[in-house]
Image: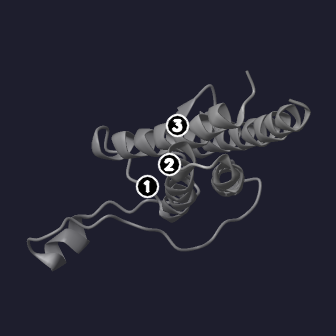
Amino acid sequence: MLTLRNAAWLAFLLPTALLGGALISQYGFGLYPCEMCIWQRWPHLVAIILALPALILRPKAWSMPLVVAAALAILTSGLIGGFHAGVEYHWWEGFTSCSTNLAAGGDMLDSIMNAPLIRCDVAQWTLFGISLAGFNFLLSVGGAILILLMVATGRKDADHG
């Protein structure tokens, strides 16, 4: 059933799963993010923050704009992921800066000297030739479109019911 409530659940669960997967790949499997990877995480966090009240708050009038805003945040992450994937596949040039993660505490100079340098134009992991940024593009853009369709369909059903 394509309802606003289901759209809100999808707007909450999709970015939660994608952000959770990114954090697990980083902390569980040592796939450190580059700068563009980090950029993709922020819109997912925004989507989670927007979708959660849409699930909790009443009246429903607040839910629709929150779910639409969450879908747009998810779409933003997907578009950043699409740009990043294009950089990884060398379809276009990305930004010249690279990023690293520094360990908290300890000797700062030692942390800087031993930190891994993560390039934005090299995919650290792929499956079927698709990088993590590529998967984020596919899942986020597809999910955002589905959420917006669910909202539109749910709204039409509410207007006729």
Image mark for residue 13: 3
- Quarter holding the N terminus? top right
Measure the alpha-carbon separation of dots 2 and 3: 10 Å
Tell whether 33 sits left or right of 3.
Answer: left
Mark 1, residue position: 33
Task: Pinpoint residue 98: horizontal percent, then vertical percent.
Answer: 48, 69
Tell whether 125 sits left or right of 81.
Answer: left
Tell me which residue sits at (51%, 41%) in the image.
18
Q: Amino acid at mark 1?
A: Pro
In terms of secondary structure, where does tag 3 sit? helix
Tell me which residue sits at (79%, 34%) in the image.
154
- Residue 60 vs residue 119, the one in the foreground: 60
Task: Pinpoint residue 60: horizontal percent, then vertical percent.
Answer: 66, 47
Q: Quadrant of residue 151?
A: top right
Q: Are marks 3 and 1 in contact (CB under 8 Å)?
A: no
- Residue 48 vs residue 92, the one in the foreground: 48
